[in-house]
Every structure is written in structure tokens, then in C-alpha cells.
Amino acid sequence: MRVCTPHCGLDPETRLGGEMYELEVLREMSGRGLAFDILLARHKTYPDGVPNWTVHRLPIGRGLRWPIAAFVLPPFIRRVYRATRFDLLRAHSLRYIGPAALAARAWYGVDVPIVAHHHHLDPSWLNPLIEGRVMRAVERVIVGSEFARRQASEELGVPRSNSPSSRTAWTARSRRGRDRKRSRAASGGRRADRPVLGSLEPRKNLAFLLDVWRESRVCTARPG
């Protein structure tokens, strides 16, 4: 199967959670034989030597902004479709890529199913207008948790049957117990023992995590 996946970024040195997720998911799926047509702005970096990746450079010199992506991406998606005849169009971001994917299918003749990914909703009055419409219009919405599935259903009216949950690629990888050397090779040279940090956003509730960690330390230190 060949999958087209427009992207905001795939920097192998990123510490952004969403970008790390995408790197690991695309590596995992390409290792299973899926071919990817990846659309990136011409200045964006990406890991070298990943099998089954074909990178198509977008004719823009800056990163995508969501209002611009809806107009810039659809004709380029059509161009890649005519060249490769990919089987599936993937929207890793509901707001940045979702509207462009729907426009490519509706207005530019890219006649393929669309799969979108939903991680969480930041508070915004645009959620029903963009995220909600995208999730209801695509064939499948992949979520990483029951929380995300419930949020999409309760806040945006997305049918739960349209949102199968899926483990993240690095969870599956760690459970298979790959060794450190192999993990480093798969991560484009990044050290496996290097700290991995995401953004410290309020919704991640780091203070609560630290409280739980402190309580667990106290409990384990008590005798008996």
C-alpha cells in the first residue's frame, strides 16, 4: 500500500510530542512494508535512510500555517497523486492537514480514502468548524486513547465507531524489547538513553504527575 502524508515537520532532533509520534509511527509502518509519499516544506529536515519514504518538497520556504495549508496543499497533493497513484491520504493533524485532504478529494479528483489522527482538543471555538467537520467526513479517525475517543464523541459528535483506538508505535516497540543499538539506528542516530522531553503544557498536568511520583516514593520507602 502507498500512503500520502503531508507534514508540518519530521525533524529527527525534535522534542515536540506530536512530531516524535509521527516519526515513530511512520518508521514503524514503513518497516512493515508500507510506502509513504511525504510532503514537506523545502527547508524542513527529516531522517536519512528510512526505507519506503519518498519525500516531495513543497514549494514554500516556511513551515505550514493552518489557514495557508488548506490552499497550498490540495493542488500539490493532486500532483503527487497523478505521479504515484497512492492508495490512502493521511491527515496527521486535523486542523493543519484535514481541510486540505478533504479539498484534494472534493475539488482535485484525489479519489482515495482519508484517515485522520486525533490526539486531543485545545480549547477553541474553531473545533466544531474544523476538527469536528474533518472527523465526520473522513473514513477513519485514529485515536491514541479512550479519552480522545470520548472527547471527539461528546464535544464534536463524532461517531465512536469511526474512531478506533491505536497504540503508539514506540509503545509497541518497547514491548518487543528491542535493544538500545537497534533503537538508536531506527531513531536516525539519536541516542536511546538521551532524555526525551515534550512541551510542558497545562493539559499534561505535570504537577499532578510529580505529586503521584512523590507519594509513590514515600509509600515504597515505608517499612513493611
Image: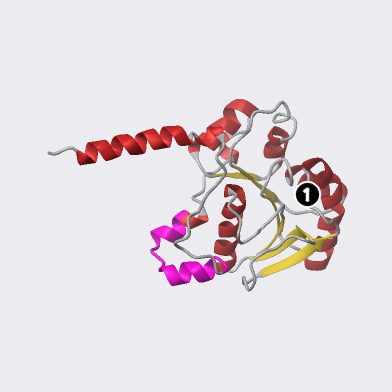
Vertical side of 185 occupied by 211: above or below? above
- Which residue occupies 30% across, 34% down? 215
Q: Nearer the viewer, residue 14 or 121?
A: 14
Q: Position of residue 52 (x, y in %)?
A: 65, 70
Residue 129 location (% of width, % of height): 75, 30
Q: Which residues are magenta?
A: 171-188
Q: Nearer the viewer, residue 87 or 130?
A: 130
Q: Is residue 149 visible?
A: no
Quadrant, the N terminus: bottom right
Q: Secondary structure at mark 1?
A: loop
User: Left or right of 216: which side holds 45?
Assistant: right
- Asked whether 109 falls inside the magenta stretch, the response is no
- From the viewer's perspective, is residue 189 above or below residue 103? below
Residue at (39, 58) in percent of width and height? 175
Q: Residue at x 75, y 59 (%)?
A: 39
Choose top left, top right, bottom left or bottom right for residue 199: top right
Residue where numbered disc 1 is placed: 64
Residue type of the residue flagged with mark 1:
Leu
Q: Main secondary structure of the magenta part?
A: helix
Is 182 in the magenta? yes
Left or right: residue 189 compared with residue 82: left
* Left/right of residue 209 with respect to residue 79 in the rendered view: left
Above or below, comparing residue 38 to residue 123 in the picture = below
Q: Quadrant of the C terminus?
A: top left
